[in-house]
Amino acid sequence: MHSDRFLKCTMDEESIFWPSREEMARPDSFHPSTLQDVNGLEEGVEFLPTMNAKKVEKRGPKRWVVVTTALIVFLLLSLIVGLLVWHFKYRRAPVQKVYNGHLVVPNLDFIDAYENSSTPEFTMLSKKVKETIEEIYRSHSAIGPYHKETVITAFSEGSVIAYYWSVFIVPAYRAEALDNAMADKQSLIQTVTYKSRNPVLQVKSVVAFPADPSIIESSRDNSCSFALHAKEGEITSFTTPGFPNSPYPNNARCTWVLRADANSIISLTFKTFDVERCSEKSDFIKVYNSLSPVEPHSLVKLCGSYPPSYNLTFLSSQNVMLVMLITNAEGRNPGFKAEFFQLPKMKICGGTLKGESGVFTSPYYPAHYPPNMDCVWDIEVPSTKNVKVRFNVFYMLEPGIPVNSCTKDYVEIKNTKYCGEPPSFVVASNNNKIRVQFHSDQSYTDTGFSAEFLSYDSSDPCPGKFTCNTGRCIVKTMRCDGWVDCTDASDERSCNCTENQFRCNNGWCKPRFWLCDGVNDCGDNSDELQCKCPDKNFKCSNGKCILDTQKCDGTDDCGDGSDEGKCDRAQSVSCKDYTYKCRNGLCMSKTNPECDGKKDCTDNSDEENCDCGIRSYSKQSRIVGGLNSEVGEWPWQVSLHVKGQGHICGASLVSDKWLVSAAHCFQDTSQIRYSDATLWTAFLGLHDQSNRNSEKVQERSIKRIISNTLFNDYTYDYDIAVLELQSPVTFTTTVRPICLPDSTHDFPAGKDIWVTGWGATSEGGAGATILQKAEIRVINQTMCNTLMTGQITPRMMCVGVLTGGIDACQGDSGGPLVSVESNSRLFLAGVVSWGDGCAQRNKPGIYTRVSKLRDWIRQQTGV
Ligand code: ARG
């Protein structure tokens, strides 16, 4: 960001001090100096031959005076004409303005008939309200003259709230004044109570907001508008037109008016949600805490697709809600299925909490809390103790609001406001009382928080543990271990480094292994400084230093190709081991050009066969805690079962009938011939091992198993196998293939990568029933070979978290190690192969390096 600003700054300067390119190119005749030439020429008119001097004098005013006067008159005329054209054509050009609004009729009781716009009661009341609105407009000079039409769209309780839209045709130069007058609530109300002698109806709280003109057409077209009223004790459901068998209509605007009884609120849940992938112009759904679609009352805007586990429950603050679907000309998505029901309105929230400890949450957690809510919790623990509050989950994020201002929704404790989505945090008090306040404003809500309060001894806040400056307690061994465990890193400050550690410039202690591994482990890069090449040099992956100018010049100066691998421009270069080869034989200097959405090869072969590595759900759950996967999160994950033994190994789907797995899974033992394909069954689209009959699961027998003949069961070199399915699978939301990386594909050290499987959740422990996921880092090959005492071959890669605690384990073998590349596309970087125990510190997991075996996979499978 810093360098960006610098760049911008220098560019501005350039435009001030230097003539622009066009200026420089302009012909000289446009320069001021040449205007003088023109004048000179005009002066020349005076030089008449001397013999004609008399004649000239007789002609009355001098000719130049006439010419000048004519010129001035002409200029003045054109100015006036120009002004008139501007005034009538542009300033007075009529523009259409539309406003959405609502008002309250205080002295009227709501009756059921007002819900239905075809009843005589509705017609009567809307006529009166309309007249009143027109009267208000008329009495305001900035509004009245331009009003064209007002339509009352609905009524709701409280006493009676009327919703309407108004259209104005206003000359362009009056548009701003109209906007201001409409935005000024005060002026709208005052006009009724003071100026008007005979108000048709008493009204108050008149508000209006600028709206999209297209609502006029759609409110006249009722083909996609629905009105639903919640039934006591029942759940009402509704869907987009055609759901789930056909896609929702294009170029549509659909509305669902949801109502509940008086003094109730509405709970709305999207059970399945799949609309067009989000982009600036994509289809979207908006939910409003009102019956008029105005921005200040919108609760959420949704697009894309959500996994079933994502919490999409929203609460209203009154007994009405509006759901709106806006679609563009493209896309074929199924849409949504939603349910709603009514709840009694919550009178109060918060309260007094007493005791040693306890839990509390934001209203209706984990649903999206309602707008317009304020809760206060007064927490008190026994008088000899102190109290602290720990927020285990915290989501109060408003689109477009910086999290350091917390101007909209927030939690406030001891004069500090919290908002956004911070990782779990603790707020401690130095006495036995603490007050927690929750506030939500009228628009955009989130899922809120789940918190607990605990009493603690002021002399020992974390018995047997280390106390972070944030108040969190962590186990003592995490102190000064080189890894940040307290969110504020206080566990890594003021440490004495041990002999196996070195001291970063920022004072942290890091394992010596991490010096010069090409990854910034210190955070200030000081672990990579001492090993740096001289100035204007590039450091190769093998440690060699070359001149910067030799980087990306098409020659392998490093000897390992690393200077030619990470080039930005796709340039045709002479082919090497590390250059991507297009189908036409040309080689590219760009790293990982496959399926990145950009055409790099002239024959486009780098962007072919790219229907892979994309998840069906564009959104992922934010639920923390646990490493359970979402349904559909890893649709290429396969579970391989052996008859009578259940799940044995993992595998990855790479086409509709080929799987990639580990060769060691199919090694025969004295009892069982694991190489026999008929022993195995593949489960695709599986999430929960105990629910293999789910309709999302596709079960297949294995036709043949091809293990790499170079597999060495002692060293585990070439630990790869491909399996052909008896019959192809169908791609669905839960079954899709992963992309195979090109043999030149680079997965650099330090890159975050994911491993998934149903393997043991602890060393020697039992397998998981729900598919697990873990995020780990690629480890420098040379470094890893040192850590693993020279057992690492070029067909292996080390990936792990050296703090320990996160790793693949028994039962994960054969399963995928995937990396998120450009365009959020995922590639199969590795296959779970082996490890020294599981999740031990400084013992990464070892994976088969798929890129090194890419050609072998192609030979065997044609994929
Ligand atoms: N060989 C194991 C299996 O068959 C996989 C071990 C992976 N170990 C590790 N620490 N990453 O399931």
Image (tube, rainbow, N blue to C red):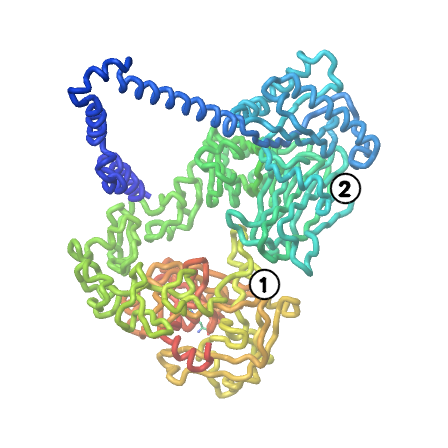
Residue 229's mark? 2
- Locate residue 423, reporting x and y percent: 46, 45
The image quadrant in which ligand 1 is located: bottom left
For label 2, the crowd category at 10 Å Cα-Cα, with few meaning under 14, some 14 to 19 and many 20 or more, is: some
**391 on left or right of 751:** right
Outermost residue on the bottom side: it is 670
Q: Which amino acid does label 1 sit on?
A: Thr
Q: Mark 1 points at which residue?
A: 733
- Locate residue 746, reporting x and y percent: 34, 65
Q: Residue at x 21, y 53 (%)?
A: 529
Q: Distance between the residues labelled 1 and 2?
A: 33 Å
* Rendering quarter of residue 50: top left
**710 on left or right of 162:** left
Indicate which disc, 1 or 2, sits on the residue closer to the N terminus: 2
Q: Front-most of 447 and 99?
A: 99
Q: Front-most of 696 and 58?
A: 58
User: Ligand 1: does it lie within 8 Å of the C-beta at label 1?
Assistant: no
Q: Which amino acid does label 2 sit on?
A: His
Q: Front-most of 15 and 447?
A: 15
Q: Residue at x 48, y 24 (%)?
A: 84
Vertical arrangement, residue 847 with respect to residue 447, above or below: below
- Locate residue 202, reporting x and y percent: 73, 19
- Locate residue 419, reporting x and y percent: 49, 37
